[in-house]
């Protein structure tokens, strides 16, 4: 693929990201919004797709599509090889020990619910406790509340400080002989805090408790090695990492996955079915009932190829430059409060403008072509912790530039002028 | 549409200095309006004087569009009959959703037509309409309405 190798060249030439070369890979970035160049800084909600991934989807639909794991014909074999090839790419990207530890799901929410149904309902009972954190997205709160309600188990919540960092001393105190699971986010979607998950996993393992990590906001932006972290489960989505919507991953240690119950029943997840008895398929297929989003899975594999061709370390360094520059600029703004000030945080800038509701901020920024997210970011407990109903959130990715940060800052000046 | 057109002086003024702000101690009708998607939350109280809206007040937490719409609604319906208020509710809703062009079709909205621009911002239509749905609920003795309900409270009535 020509443009993929051009991304590699761009990196080799400068040692850092050549962001203009990267931008040329993303056709959507050339559109105009309200007559202004699009400034897309809503990447924590969903990222854009490079031409390389679009081309891969087109090639699949044009010349490779059939149902997988079934037919003996050419197209079915081709599609199966491409889909399982994507699983192998994802395994290497995560440094998982085996490909069968990589389960295709519909997205992070679906992955988290799979653990709740497959692991939680089998191994968590009355009086047991699940530890989550103040920083969780609703998708890592609600499934556990549903389980607690069903089983009579209890939720324990790790608090955070005013900077948005989890209090690790409090975390250690939450463990009891009833703790059965820790479910924590790697990076906060609302604040950008990078949690010390490796250390937190070690703490849980010392007490014999498995750990599920919500990696939706981490894996698009930094190198993640599941064996180094030693996490028991790791969940993420394709569409936040240059891939398609409708596809996500649950990584799980093979020994745990084998113990777990299937989440959904249907085709592909069985070895044999009679009316007397059904024998389930081996992992990962035990958790993949029905025809999956084949194109999306192959597209996720292509997205990973793309990100690796750029280099995860370079992406992380580029986003660090962006968030540092943006944070400095926002600190100069009068009547603007940054929510989430943990050191070393990811490329997420959440803020409030005094006297202006975030939805008014978002509408005015949109007039300047700037796409941000406004609201509670599906993290109402975070908003409650900081005593605010909502924030405006800018979140950066590999294709964002320093002049785009300037456009965001100029937009805030305009908001303040209008509401002055 | 340009937000310069939406965030006009009159809207910004009502946002900054909302009229009829507060709660009526002797209200005959009350309702609460909530937009769970953006967190707009208002409380409306009014007192009917015979068939007319004698006094009306609102308070709450909301964006500028919702607050200005609430404020201008209270100044517009005060002294009007219930029937006239219901007509304004329908006309405002039709304007905000693009069914009524205030420039070419007869209506009673007057200065309320500054909100016409929300028709081009689907995510903000609910902000502007919330107080009007809440007024409709209050007049029909429903205590709480939500923009995320599965029915249109005004449409169902008709």
Image (cartoon, coloured by chain):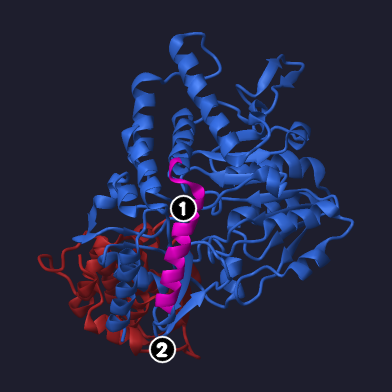
Question: Label 2 marks which chain's residue?
Answer: B
Which residues are drawn in magenta? A309-330
Determine whether label 2 and label 1 are within 8 Å by CB: no
Is A302 placed left or right of A178 in the picture? Answer: left
Q: Is residue A197 left or right of residue A306?
A: right
Q: Secondary structure at mark 1?
A: helix
Q: Position of residue A360 (x, y in %)?
A: 35, 73
Give the quadrant of residue A96: top right
Q: Which residue is mark 2?
A: B21
Chain that is red in the image? B
Left or right, residue A366 beside residue A263 = left
Few, some or many residues within 10 Å of mark 2 (<14, 14–19, 20+): some
Q: Is residue B70 magenta?
A: no
Subunit of label 1: A
Res. B40 in view:
no
**Along the line of sight, the residue nearer the viewer: A71 or B99:** A71
Q: Residue at x 22, y 68 (%)?
A: B117
Question: Which quadrant of the rendered structure holds the N terminus of chain A?
Answer: top left
Residue at (41%, 88%) from the top-left corner?
B21
Q: Nearer the viewer, mark 2 or mark 1?
A: 1
- Residue B60 higher or lower than A241, as above or below: below
Dot 2 lies on which element?
loop
For this view, does A130 lie left or right of residue B128? right
Task: Please give the name of the residue rendered at 48% of the width and 24% of the height, measured from the top-left corner.
Answer: A82
Closer to the camera in the image, B112 or B29? B112
The answer to whether residue A372 is above or below residue B72 is: above
What is the quadrant of the C terminus of chain A in the image?
Answer: bottom left
Q: Nearer the viewer, residue A313 or B119?
A: A313
Name the residue at the left extreme: B104
Q: Which residue is mark 1?
A: A315
In percent of width and height, residue B73 lies at: 31, 79
């Amino acid at each position: 693929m020509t443009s993929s190798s051009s991304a590699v060249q761009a990196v080799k030439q400068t040692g850092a990201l050549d962001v203009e070369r990267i931008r040329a890979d993303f056709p959507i970035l050339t559109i105009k919004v309200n007559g202004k160049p699009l400034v897309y800084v809503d990447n924590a909600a969903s990222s854009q797709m490079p031409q390389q991934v679009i081309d891969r989807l087109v090639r699949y639909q044009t010349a490779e599509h059939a149902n997988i794991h079934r037919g003996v014909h050419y197209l079915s074999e081709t599609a199966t090889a491409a889909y399982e090839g994507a699983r192998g790419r994802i395994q290497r990207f995560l440094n998982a020990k085996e490909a069968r530890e990589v389960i295709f799901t519909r997205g992070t929410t679906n992955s988290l619910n799979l653990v709740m149904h497959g692991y939680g309902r089998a191994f968590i009972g009355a009086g047991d406790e699940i530890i989550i954190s103040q920083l969780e997205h609703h998708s890592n709160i609600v499934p556990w509340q549903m389980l607690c309600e069903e089983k009579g188990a209890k939720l324990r919540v790790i608090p955070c400080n005013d900077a948005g960092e989890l209090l690790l001393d409090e975390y250690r105190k939450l463990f009891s002989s009833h703790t059965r699971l820790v479910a924590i986010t790697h990076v906060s979607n609302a604040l950008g805090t990078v949690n010390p998950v490796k250390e937190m996993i070690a703490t849980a393992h010392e007490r014999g408790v498995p750990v599920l990590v919500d990696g939706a906001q981490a894996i698009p932006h930094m190198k993640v090695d599941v064996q180094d972290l030693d996490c028991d489960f790791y969940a993420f989505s394709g569409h936040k990492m240059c891939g398609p919507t409708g596809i996500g991953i649950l990584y799980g240690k093979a020994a745990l996955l084998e113990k777990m119950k299937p989440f959904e029943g249907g085709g592909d997840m069985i070895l044999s079915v009679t009316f007397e008895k059904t024998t389930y398929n081996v992992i990962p297929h035990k958790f993949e009932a029905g025809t999956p989003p084949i194109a999306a899975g192959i597209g996720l594999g292509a997205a990973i190829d793309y990100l690796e061709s750029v280099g995860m370390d370079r992406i992380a360094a580029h986003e660090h430059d962006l968030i540092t520059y943006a944070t400095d600029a926002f600190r100069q703004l009068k009547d603007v409060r940054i929510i989430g000030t943990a050191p070393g945080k990811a490329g997420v800038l959440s803020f409030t403008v005094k006297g202006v509701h975030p939805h008014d901020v978002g509408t005015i920024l949109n007039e300047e072509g700037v796409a941000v997210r406004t609201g509670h970011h599906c993290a109402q407990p975070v908003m409650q912790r900081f005593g605010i109903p909502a924030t405006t959130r800018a979140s950066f990715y590999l294709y964002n530039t320093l002049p785009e940060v300037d456009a965001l800052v100029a937009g805030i000046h305009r908001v303040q002028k209008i509401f002055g | 549409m340009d937000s310069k057109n939406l965030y006009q002086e009159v809207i910004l003024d009502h946002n900054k200095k909302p009229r009829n702000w507060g709660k009526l101690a002797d209200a005959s009708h009350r309702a609460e309006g909530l937009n769970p998607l953006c967190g707009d939350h208002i409380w409306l109280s009014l007192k009917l004087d015979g068939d007319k809206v004698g006094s009306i007040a609102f308070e709450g937490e909301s964006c500028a569009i919702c607050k200005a719409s609430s404020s201008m609604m209270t100044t517009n319906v005060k002294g009007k009959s219930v029937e006239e208020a219901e007509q304004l509710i329908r006309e405002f809703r039709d304007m905000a959703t693009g069914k009524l062009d205030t420039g070419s079709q007869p209506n009673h909205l007057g200065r309320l037509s500054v909100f016409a621009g929300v028709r081009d911002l689907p995510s903000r239509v609910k902000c502007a309409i919330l107080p009007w749905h809440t007024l409709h609920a209050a007049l029909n003795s429903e205590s709480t309405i939500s923009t995320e309900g599965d029915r249109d409270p005004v449409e169902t009535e008709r």
